[in-house]
Amino acid sequence: MPSFFYNDSEFIVRTGGWDVIRKLPDGKTVMVGANLFEGLSPAEAEAKARLLVRATNPVGVKIVGPDVNHPSKIGDLKIVGPDVAHPNFVYWDKDSTSFPKGS
């Protein structure tokens, strides 16, 4: 099973189903993704796993509003944010205009 470190965290690419696993400092593991790279060679699966880990675990903070017209790509995965063109605001002291009481 190939493993690599990114941002002081160890990640393991388990062959068979090409699962990506994060190994925690206490020895426990967390599944990052399962059966992601079926049909790929071990080198290709590890390269794609590295790209996935870098995209989903950024170093630093990047704040970008969702853009439904331009989805984010993480390797071969396409992530489409929620459509916030008409957000529903919730007020503590009155009914929401989107969902008034009795609806």
Image: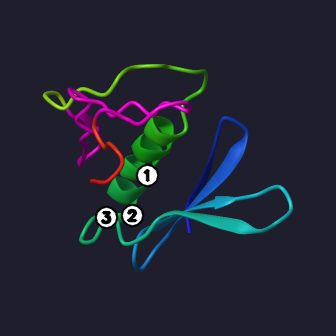
Q: Which residues are magenta?
A: 71-97
Label 1 to label 2: alpha-carbon separation = 10 Å
**Mark 3 and mark 2: Cα distance apart in space:** 9 Å
The answer to whether the residues at label 3 and label 2 have Cβ atoms under 8 Å apart is no
Q: Which mark is residue 37?
A: 3
Q: Is residue 17 magenta?
A: no
- In the image, taking residue 31 as reference, residue 98 lies left or right, namely left
The residue that label 2 is drawn on is 42
| Residue, disc 1 | 49
Q: Is residue 8 left or right of residue 71?
A: right
Residue at the image point whose x is 38% and y is 56% from the top: 43
Q: Amino acid at mark 2?
A: Pro
Which quadrant does the N terminus fall into?
bottom right
Q: Position of residue 80 (x, y in %)?
A: 24, 41
Q: Earlier in the sequence, mark 1 or mark 2?
A: 2
Q: Quadrant of residue 100?
A: top left
